[in-house]
Image (cartoon, helix red, strand yellow):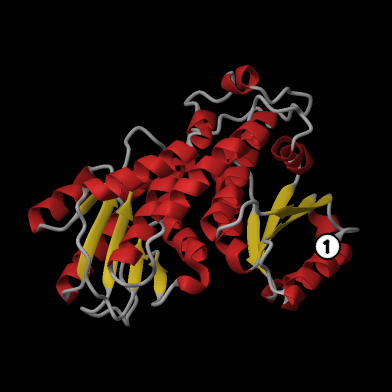
Amino acid sequence: MTTTNLQLDRESIGRIDSSDQLTDVLAIPEHLRDALWKVESSQLSEWDSPAGLVVAGMGGSAIGGALARAALGDSATRPILAARAYGLPPWTTPDTTVLCSSYSGDTEETLACYEAAGALGATRVVATSGGRLAELARADGVPVIPVAGGLQPRAAVAYMTVAALEVAARCGAGPRCASDIDVAAEHLEELVVEWGPEAPEDTLAKSLARGLVGTVPVIAGAGVTTAIAYRWKTQINENAKVPAFWHELPELDHNELVGWTGAGELARFSAVFLEDSDTHPRIADRVELTESLVRDAAAGTFRVQTRGTTLVERVFSMVLLGDLVSVYLAALRGTDPGPVELIDQLKRSLAER
């Protein structure tokens, strides 16, 4: 039941949040620092992958590759692409590095990609907290980047993103970002204070959650914020347990925009535009115009800016904000953000086939 008058403080959220997902979100700055240390502990060497990097994973384990690509921006020197399937892209060659990311280490799609990469002779690296993937990698002499245990896979976003950034640097797909990651962690500590549960009720994260409750959020990103828009959608799905959708500008102005014409007849949809300080001027124009065109059909429209100077800062500022909004939204709905029962049910059913 929706409880819009709920105070979004630790005590109130704690009565709903049985596995303390809020603390895991607030720990993202610490996770960034720990992730760097864990990559160093894996003693990765450097090598050259002219064909670039494929990050193979699913769900919360896959988003790190997309966020790493966003955080590198124009400094990426080779393709960095995702494989969210039972196999690798057909153009994958021995000159490709494949980072197999699975929090549990037992994700069947990622295990299939690990085997496929080995058959191709591609360089493999693994990021996991354990499971079958860690066992296979250690038996094969494949480097394993350890990930902290005891989290929901989606809460390991900092670990998976840092792993992808560091592997990209080691294989020649981008520069080292360790100093930027440290700076981002320090900045995020300030944002945790500004947006966290101890902040006033009218703070940005809490206000956004209150604006979205009772609606179907439609998240729009562009450029740097495209992958973050997808992250917001999936966090709202898993934490708040409601449908949410995402798209990117300028493409959505060539199709989705028209769909808003009938939105009011179907449900209460809200539009959220994730903006960045370095966006293309024409994209900025499109955000302003698109918001004005959908406003009458939407239950609410919201524009949110990244915070920070470097790309790593800006990407993770928006990740932190979206994660907090999703947990606050869950609390306002009286929904425990931790369990993902339908996913667990699906996995059990698949295991029986």
Q: At numbered mark 1, what does the secondary structure look like: helix, strand or loop?
A: helix
Q: Quadrant of residue 123?
A: bottom left
Residue 87 position, x and y percent, is 30, 69
309 in relation to 189, above or below:
below
Residue 345 visible in the snapshot: no
Please name whichever residue, 282 or 103, is drawn nearer the observer in this view of the structure. Answer: 282
| Left or right: 309, with 39 as reference point | right
Q: Residue at x 65, y 40 (%)?
A: 325
Circle 1 packing at 10 Å, graded few (<14), some (14-19), many (20+), is some
| Left or right: 273, with 310 as reference point | right
Please name whichever residue, 155 or 187, is drawn nearer the observer in this view of the structure. Answer: 187
Please name whichever residue, 325 or 254, is drawn nearer the observer in this view of the structure. Answer: 325
Q: Residue at x 15, y 48 (%)?
A: 135
The residue where tag 1 is placed is 291
Which amino acid type corresponds to the residue marked 1 in the rendered image?
Answer: Glu
Residue 168 position, x and y percent, is 34, 65
For the N terminus, give its image quadrant. Answer: top right
Residue 189 visible in the snapshot: yes
Q: Residue at x 32, y 80 (%)?
A: 90
Residue 86 position, x and y percent, is 32, 65
171 in relation to 20, above or below:
below
